[in-house]
Image: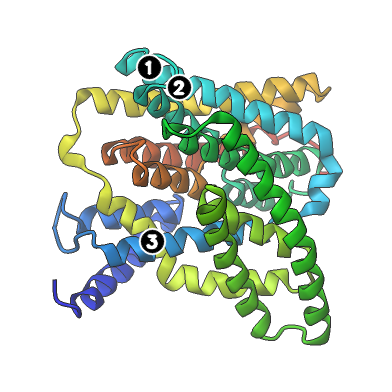
């Protein structure tokens, strides 16, 4: 490959991804779905205009790091504190039930295997993909209806944030357990040490950023330093603690989410992500998706995957909300609000592909889940909120 061919590839990716993202938005679908489909069309499976290269893989990795950093920056710790223990319980149920459901679904299709085997971890990983809840899609749907500030809306938002944190931790454990030489206690110890390290570094970094932010508000040095912290935490997490790099990036965002200029940092990160790294990441999903291997079994699995992913979220979160003394209608709203999947599900799937826990053909199921859940959730929530007072 000629060194300058990468410019051609990037031009094709950016133009096609953004064009189909606009088309997706016009059709009331998530824009990421359009970018993924763009990668599928320009990739080896259809037109063959762009092939996956090491450079594009590295660009995509930066893209996923920036996405997780932005997710951390957009976390509202005050909202988390408002709903507190109830949101935590709902989030735990929203992770556990889909995790079990996804694992059993994979085993039902491909056979039950012994705990600790490679097939077992592949099954658990399918469950991991189902654990993610898209905070962005949920927030947008509630904001458009003016329901974000109500008790149910705040609970959904807080639970969705906690849900993703727990899901990322579960992903870290599954990836670590896949290595037969790794001991369970070592994984627990490394994970605990990382979060202790992150807590200490977080306090120091937060105080430094707060001082700089007060002295030099709204200056470009703040997002630049924030980006450096993001990359540093991603590297340290992966290299020294054996934790997924996306966890480190997410934690970096959490550290900075409460400083005054957190939105300014997120805005600058969004420019990089929106213009270049985001399209490359989502298009790379399409480039890796292998439709040549699609058969009746895979298509049936994809349909079952969507159904199980949606139902387990509603059941898990809804039942726990009911146990937390929410009314029946409120519990159903929480369950439905938690069933959307988006970027985090793709990030988890991408990570599984890179470590050999998943093959590209299963991206079809993930993409289908994102599209169906993103379209169905706002519609169902609108129906459920039809006769509900404004402040609820």
- Answer with the quarter of the image where residue 312 lies: top right
For the question of whether residue 145 can be seen, the reply is no
Q: Quadrant of the N terminus?
A: bottom left
> Do the residues under discs 2 and 1 have CB atoms within 8 angstroms?
yes
Q: CA distance from mark 2 to mark 1?
A: 6 Å
In this rendering, the answer to whether 169 lies above or below 288 is: above
The residue under label 2 is 103
Relative placement, left or right, of 13 versus 121 is left
- Alpha carbon separation for disc pair 1 and 3: 31 Å
Q: Which residue is mark 1?
A: 107
Question: Mark 1, residues whose alpha carbon is within 10 Å: few (<14), some, or many (≥20)?
Answer: some
Q: Are marks 1 and 3 in contact (CB under 8 Å)?
A: no
Which residue is identified by label 3? 60
In this image, 296 relative to 122: left or right? left
Which x, y percent locates residue 319?
70, 19
> Distance from label 2 to label 3 (Cα)?
28 Å
């Amino acid at each position: 490959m000629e060194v300058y061919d990468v410019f051609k590839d990037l031009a094709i990716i950016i133009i096609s991804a953004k064009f189909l993202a606009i088309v997706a938005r016009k059709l009331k679908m998530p824009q990421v779905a359009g970018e993924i489909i763009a990668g599928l069309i320009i990739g080896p499976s259809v037109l063959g205009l762009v092939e996956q290269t090491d450079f594009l893989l590295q660009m995509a990795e930066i893209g996923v790091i920036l996405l997780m950093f932005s997710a951390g920056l957009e976390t509202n710790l005050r909202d988390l504190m408002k709903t507190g223990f109830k949101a935590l319980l709902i989030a735990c149920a929203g992770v556990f039930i889909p995790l079990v459901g996804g694992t059993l679904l994979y085993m039902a299709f491909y056979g039950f295997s012994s705990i600790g085997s490679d097939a077992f971890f592949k099954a658990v990983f399918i469950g991991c993909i189902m654990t993610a809840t898209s905070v962005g899609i949920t927030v947008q749907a509630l904001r458009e209806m003016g329901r974000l500030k109500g008790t149910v809306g705040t609970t959904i938002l807080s639970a969705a944030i906690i849900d993703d944190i727990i899901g990322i931790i579960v992903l870290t454990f599954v990836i670590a357990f896949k290595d037969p030489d790794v001991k369970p206690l070592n994984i627990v110890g490394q994970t605990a040490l990382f979060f202790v390290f992150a807590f200490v570094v977080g306090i120091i970094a937060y105080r430094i950023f707060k001082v700089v932010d007060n002295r030099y508000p709204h200056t470009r040095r703040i997002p630049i330093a924030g980006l450096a912290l993001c990359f540093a935490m991603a590297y340290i997490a992966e290299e020294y603690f054996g934790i997924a790099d996306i966890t480190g990036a997410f934690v970096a965002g959490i550290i900075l989410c409460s400083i005054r200029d957190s939105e300014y940092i997120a805005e600058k990160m969004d420019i990089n992500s929106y213009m270049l790294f985001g399209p490359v990441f989502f298009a790379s999903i399409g480039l890796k998706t292998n439709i040549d291997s699609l058969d009746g079994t895979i298509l049936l699995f994809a349909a079952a995957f969507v159904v199980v992913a949606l139902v387990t979220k509603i059941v898990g979160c809804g039942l726990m909300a009911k146990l937390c003394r929410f009314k029946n209608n409120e519990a159903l709203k929480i369950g439905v609000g938690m069933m959307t999947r988006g970027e985090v599900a793709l990030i988890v799937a991408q990570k599984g592909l890179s470590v050999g826990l998943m093959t590209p053909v299963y991206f079809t199921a993930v993409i289908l889940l994102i599209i169906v859940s993103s379209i169905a959730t706002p519609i169902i929530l609108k129906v459920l909120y039809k006769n509900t007072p404004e402040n609820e």
